[in-house]
Amino acid sequence: MPVVSLVTGGAGFMGSHLADHLIADGHSVVVLDDLSGGFRENVPNQATFVHGSVTDHALVNRLFDQYAFDYVYHLAAYAAEGLSHFIRRFNYTNNLIGSVNLINASVHHNVRCFVFTSSIAVYGAGQSPMTEQMIPVPEDPYGIAKFAVEQDLRVSHEMFGLDYVIFRPHNVYGERQNIGDRYRNVVGIFMNQLLRGEPMTIFGDGTQQRAFTHIDDVAPIIARSVEYAAARNQVFNVGADVPYTVSDLAQIVANAMGYGCDVRHLGPRNEVKIAFSDHSKAESIFGRHERVSLQDGVARMAEWVRSHGARESSVFNGIEIVRNLPASWAQLAQVDV
């Protein structure tokens, strides 16, 4: 009998790469995605695609009844960290309640392991590099929701025996990323702006530091994590080691795309200034591998982006709170602040 795995968000950027690796490893894959941020074309042909949302608990339960999943890889989320302050109900419904629906079904159906992609947003403004031993103090609703799911998995293991593996990836970019999303994934935003003949926009002075991670440095580890007994019921940072400023990133992206580095600075937003992680715990379990450099990874993504062209930038129309909403986002949503 083949191993059957559910990948939520499998039409999205990270989820589709993960599905590729699982299929290559012999898994039978079912993808559940509402296509709010992903694209049907991203889903591997060998996977079974179901159009729907993790917030639909009746659909989730039917899928578990039908396929008797061995493993659940939960990547579906609306990951606009900065915007989450202003879409709190939407954030918690999608990122927390949707996750609980999956956890409930996993307990009922004795899933062998639940793999969850959390985020370094759970740490908040802690000292970098961030380690798994730090006490999380998330500073936005997105990070709060992710940490709540982590805690729910912990107590679900203690109460019901549901095994889990939690990953906290960060600033992941690469081929298939939705470059039309205005609110997240700065590498894609920069590339889309360049293709549209627009300046690259940076909130604040551009000295914010992040370690930008190519998809090939995280998807294989997440896919094969269920094969490592020592990884069960553990939390792992995963991603790149070397931080860059956003201004440095803009220059690297412009070079890879073959454009001049035309930047427009916007007013600063409420965000963590410096955020990157230590990965020694993951390396102790999964081994160390040579990571894709930012220059090489951006070049790979740029080649893919040029072949696919610009995407029409989407506007989030469900803003719930307009107080302190960055002016550029308010203009997009046509709301008064």
Image (spheres, rainbow, N blue to C red):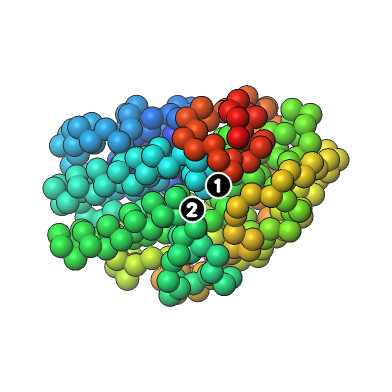
Disc 1, SS: helix
| Location of residue 182 in the rendering, given as x and y in whole percent from the top left corner | 61, 35
Left/right placement of residue 179 relative to residue 107 reads right
Mark 1: few/some/many CA within 10 Å (<14, 14-19, 20+): many
Dividing the picture into quadrants, the one containing residue 77 is top left
Dividing the picture into quadrants, the one containing residue 231 is bottom left
* Residue 177: mark in rendering: none
| Location of residue 11 in the rendering, given as x and y in whole percent from the top left corner | 44, 34
Residue hosting label 1: 82
Left/right placement of residue 112 relative to residue 276 reads left
Given the image, on which type of amino acid does mark 2 rest?
Asp
Q: Nearer the viewer, residue 275 or 172?
A: 275
Q: Nearer the viewer, residue 310 or 220?
A: 310
- The residue under the point 43% across, 46% down is 18
* Residue 140: mark in rendering: 2
Mark 2: few/some/many CA within 10 Å (<14, 14-19, 20+): many
First along the sequence among labels 2 and 1 = 1
Given the image, on which type of amino acid does mark 1 rest?
Gly
User: Does the residue at mark 2 contact the one at mark 1 (Cβ under 8 Å)?
Assistant: yes
| Residue at mark 2 to residue at mark 1: CA–CA distance | 7 Å
* Above-or-below relation of 130 to 298: below
Left/right placement of residue 270 relative to residue 53 reads right
| Location of residue 296 in the rendering, given as x and y in whole percent from the top left corner | 70, 52
Q: Quadrant of the C terminus?
A: top right
- The residue under the point 43% across, 29% down is 35
